[in-house]
Image (cartoon, rainbow, N blue to C red):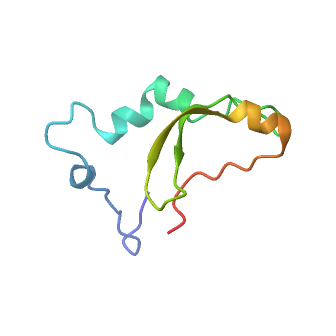
Amino acid sequence: MPTEKEPQLKFDWRSITPEDSPKTPMDIVSDPAFRDLSSPKLSVGDAAFDIELPAYDFSEGGERLTDETFHLAAIARKQPVALIFGSYT
């Protein structure tokens, strides 16, 4: 419990929640489905899930869709792969 010297900080969840949102951040964090998504399913050394994405050609400076598909599992069988999630800017 905060003392007189330590005022209680209040989080204004309304400032980050759209007015038409059916759930508050507290609803989302307490949702079992959210908690499940927050739990790792892999351990160090486990194979990553296969990701299948359309392949693009950027060789001419633009984005051109090819007829090929990128499969993470196929690349990972040939060489180590590092996945980096997040912003690097």
Residue, far front: 60
Residue, far bottom: 5
In the image, 30: left or right of 42? Answer: left
Which residue is found at the position 28% from the left and 38% from the top? Answer: 24
Q: Position of residue 5 (x, y in %)?
A: 40, 75
Which residue is found at the position 51% from the left and 60% from the top? Answer: 87
Residue, far left: 19
Give the total number of marks visible in the rendering. Answer: 0
Q: Position of residue 47 (x, y in %)?
A: 79, 31
Residue 8 appears in the picture as rendered: yes
In the image, 25: left or right of 75? Answer: left
In the image, 8: left or right of 78? Answer: left
Residue 45 appears in the picture as rendered: no
Q: Say if 17 sits above or below 76 in the image.
A: below
Front-most of residues 17 and 62: 62
Which residue is found at the position 36% from the left and 71% from the top? Answer: 4
Front-most of residues 16 and 27: 16
Q: Quadrant of residue 23?
A: top left
Which residue is found at the position 81% from the left and 32% from the top? Answer: 46
| Quarter of the image where the N terminus is located | bottom left
Q: Position of residue 54 (x, y in %)?
A: 52, 34
Front-most of residues 47 and 73: 73
Q: Say if 71 sits above or below 9 in the image.
A: above
Front-most of residues 9 and 38: 38
